[in-house]
Amino acid sequence: MVSYLRHSLAILVTLVAVHYGFTLRHHQEWKKLILTHHWPATVCEMDHGHCKNPPKYWTLHGLWPDKAQMCNNSWPFDSIQIKDILPEMNQYWPDLLHPNKSQLWKHEWQKHGTCAASLECLNTQLKYFSKGLEIYKQVDLNSVLEKSGIIPSTTYYQMKDIENALIGFYGVLPKIQCLPPHQGETAQTLGQIEICFTKEFQLRNCTESVDLNDPLIDWKAYNDDLHVCDNSTNTLYPPVKER
Ligand SMILES: *[C@@H]1O[C@H](CO)[C@@H](O)[C@H](O)[C@H]1NC(C)=O
Ligand SMILES: *[C@@H]1O[C@H](CO)[C@@H](O)[C@H](O)[C@H]1NC(C)=O
Ligand SMILES: *[C@@H]1O[C@H](CO)[C@@H](O)[C@H](O)[C@H]1NC(C)=O
Ligand SMILES: *[C@@H]1O[C@H](CO)[C@@H](O)[C@H](O)[C@H]1NC(C)=O
């Protein structure tokens, strides 16, 4: 009997410890919001080209608190809440792998939105997705790149040219991710650009941002192969293929 009790107690202590560990991990105080854009042609390449007619502009992937995720399992995504902004969502924040579906939004809400919701200005699904769209338009990455002469091309870019264009315009360090060279190739492929904000929505450096190698952070289906771009490797900013 005593041994049984001791055993139960040990299990209980372990369970509490595990639970507490998870709680800490998932509810850590976060400090910045990461506005993540992805380049549809690269996302589609990672999906083995299954996407049909991907957009020819950078689209939104997400608005992520840096150090928290899955904050509220009892707050399911509900597309009715965002019905008023669906046209813009489909245009600027589309689910590239599942056209006209809401899988991406559901994922983003559950994983990131429920944590961002600790800010009053993001505490509903409508506020969260609307704010994402609003700062996406303010950041206007597509025009900034274009004005700097960084346009999709079959010739290679140097990372410092892309980086300098962004730093020159925004005045803060972005985080730029690439698909590493395929076997037998020498160029990496531009895939994702993160621009970071304080909780007050001021631009800030992305340094010390999420470690993309942390399996908890990225979305497997999209991000599996993306790494911070190597600044000494040629970089392809691939045009969207017509299909
Ligand atoms: C989780 O979401 C539900 C539904 O919106 C809400 O009632 C509840 O207060 C939330 N829990 C926490 C801990 O924020
Ligand atoms: C998605 O919906 C829009 C508007 O309803 C339509 O124009 C477009 O063809 C649809 N795309 C796909 C891939 O079904
Ligand atoms: C952002 O990074 C740049 C370059 O490392 C640095 O000069 C600047 O002070 C940083 N800004 C802030 C607000 O930390
Ligand atoms: C490459 O990028 C890192 C991080 O921004 C920087 O510290 C380093 O100086 C860069 N190297 C070159 C060759 O530009």
Image (cartoon, helix red, strand yellow):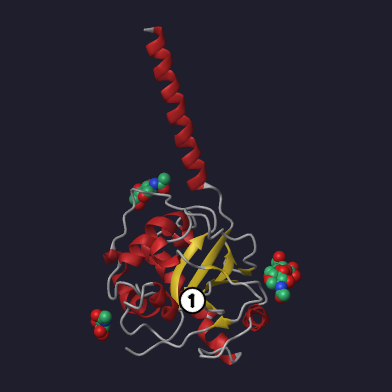
Question: What is the secondary structure assignment of the residue under circle 1?
Answer: helix
Residue drawn at x 50%, y 89% is: 152
Toward the viewer: 173 or 151?
A: 151
- Quadrant of ligand 2: it is bottom left
Indicate yes or no: mark 1 CB to ligand 2 under 8 Å. no
Quarter of the picture containing the C terminus is bottom left
Residue type (three-letter) at the residue carrying disc 1: Tyr
Residue drawn at x 61%, y 69% is: 202
Circle 1 is placed at which residue position?
Answer: 136
Toward the viewer: 21 or 229?
A: 229
Quarter of the figure with residue 94: bottom left
Density class for disc 1 (Cα within 10 Å; few <14, some 14-19, many ≥20) is many
Query: Where in the figure is residue 108, as x and y percent of width and height?
Result: 40, 62
Toward the viewer: 116 or 210?
A: 210
Q: Is residue 148 above or below residue 163?
A: below
Left or right of residue 185: residue 57: left
Toward the viewer: 173 or 179?
A: 179
Query: Where in the figure is residue 27, as x and y percent of width and height?
Result: 50, 47
Query: Where in the figure is residue 53, as x and y percent of width and height?
Result: 33, 85
Query: Where in the figure is residue 163, as x and y percent of width and height?
Result: 64, 79
